[in-house]
Image (tube, helix red, strand yellow):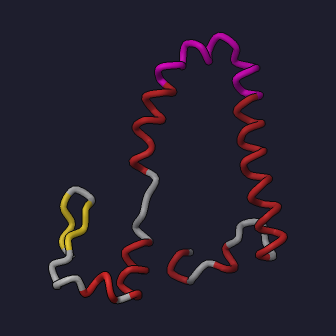
């Protein structure tokens, strides 16, 4: 497997695509890091607006975080048995 600028090229004749264990090992390196740049650009663009009303901004941020976390924590607790859902993950994901 040859990696060039985040793109994987099969140097072994495509056998990686046929071997599930190699695909699983390759998937664990996925990242949300590429999403950080557009998010940072948007946040820095609206930062003066957010600083005008810090209490309202903080309230909205906390409410959004709470709603996002609670929704997944409740569903994970119901279907997985714990709030994180880590019980059902394969060992290499933890």
Apparent side of residue 87 relative to residue 46 in the rendered image (left or right): right
Q: Position of residue 43 (x, y in %)?
A: 51, 27
Q: Which residues are magenta?
A: 44-59
Establish if 4 lies above or below 47: below
Q: Residue at x 15, y 79 (%)?
A: 11
Q: Quadrant of the C terminus?
A: bottom right
- Residue 57 on the magenta segment: yes
Apparent side of residue 41 relative to residue 90 in the rendered image (left or right): left
Q: Residue at x 44, y 45 (%)?
A: 35
Establish if 78 lies above or below 39: below
- Residue 70 on the magenta segment: no
Q: Residue at x 72, y 27 (%)?
A: 58
Establish if 13 lies above or below 94: below
Compare residues 58 and 8 and report the one nearer the observer: 8
Establish if 87 lies above or below 78: below
Q: Position of residue 56 (x, y in %)?
A: 75, 20
Apparent side of residue 41 relative to residue 54 in the rendered image (left or right): left
Q: Position of residue 57 (x, y in %)?
A: 70, 23
């Amino acid at each position: 497997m040859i990696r060039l600028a985040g793109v994987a090229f099969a140097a072994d004749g495509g056998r990686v695509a046929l071997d599930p264990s190699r695909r699983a090992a390759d998937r664990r390196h996925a990242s949300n890091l590429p999403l950080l740049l557009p998010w940072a650009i948007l946040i820095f663009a609206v930062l003066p607006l957010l600083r005008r009303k810090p209490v309202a901004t903080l309230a909205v941020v906390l409410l959004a975080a709470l709603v996002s976390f609670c929704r997944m924590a409740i569903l994970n607790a119901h279907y997985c048995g714990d709030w994180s859902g880590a019980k059902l993950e394969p060992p290499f994901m933890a």
